[in-house]
Amino acid sequence: MKNFVFLAVLFFGFMATSQAQEIAPNALGLRLGDSKGFGAEISYQRALGSNNRLELDLGWRDSDHVDAFKLTGLYQWVWSLEGNFNWYAGAGGGLGSYDNNDLDDSGAFFFVAGDVGIEYNFNIPLILSLDFRPELGFTDAYRDGLDLDIALGIRYQF
């Protein structure tokens, strides 16, 4: 327990003293990847301050037997690393609908999500990111439980 408390204090102390790189007011692009098939999302980021932002993703997911649409909203904190690299963490949630082709079943779902990732800001208005988004789904059999989503993002900053 002492180790956990020490690591938590160290982590939050690092977060409080780390310098944030100025993030772009807006970014628009794609987020590609998924843990259970292929997913593509239109992704929009809006800066809310010098080191935090809101991310909204509207996406489509395709696995072996299920097609789904979902809307995700995340609040993120951004910290500067070496050079043009940033890392970020956030939390949020979303909702969606699915269609299971094998069971002739469809419905709606909602979920809570976390997010952690790393991004690279090029000297041109382009940003590449790789993130990990665990999602805990509720409501039905399709989204019950934990989904571990990994994706690559490419966004234009303006």
Image (cartoon, helix red, strand yellow):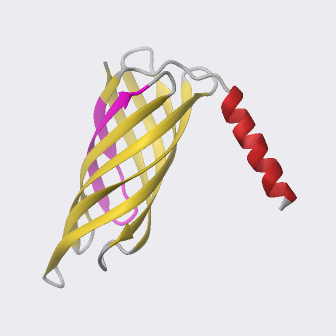
Q: Quadrant of the C terminus?
A: top left
Task: Please provide percent x and percent y for residue 5.
Answer: 80, 53
Which SS type dominates the magenta stretch?
strand
- Residue 58 on image: x %, y %: 24, 47
Give the residues drawn in magenta, as a range: 28-48
Give the left or right position of residue 62, taking residue 123 as reference.
left
**Between residues 152 and 136, which one lies in front from this camera angle?**
136
Which residue occupies 47% across, 46% down?
131
Residue placed most toward the observer, 94 or 29: 94
Q: Which image quadrant for residue 80?
A: top right
Q: Is residue 58 left or right of residue 113?
A: left
Residue 39: percent from left, percent from top: 29, 55
Q: How many numbered circles are shown? A: 0
**Which residue is rendered at x = 34% and y = 33% of the image?**
45
Looking at the image, residue 17 sits to the left or right of residue 158; the answer is: right
In the image: residue 14, left or right of residue 31: right
Q: Is residue 100 visible?
A: no
Magenta-drawn stretch contains 36: yes
Image-quadrant location for residue 31:
top left
The answer to whether 29 is drawn above or below residue 137 in the figure is above
Residue 36: percent from left, percent from top: 36, 66
Which quarter shows the N terminus? bottom right
- Point out the residue furthest to the top here: 123
Furthest-right residue in this view = 2
Q: Look at the picture and state if 62 lies above or below 102.
A: above
Residue that appears at 33% across and 27% down = 27
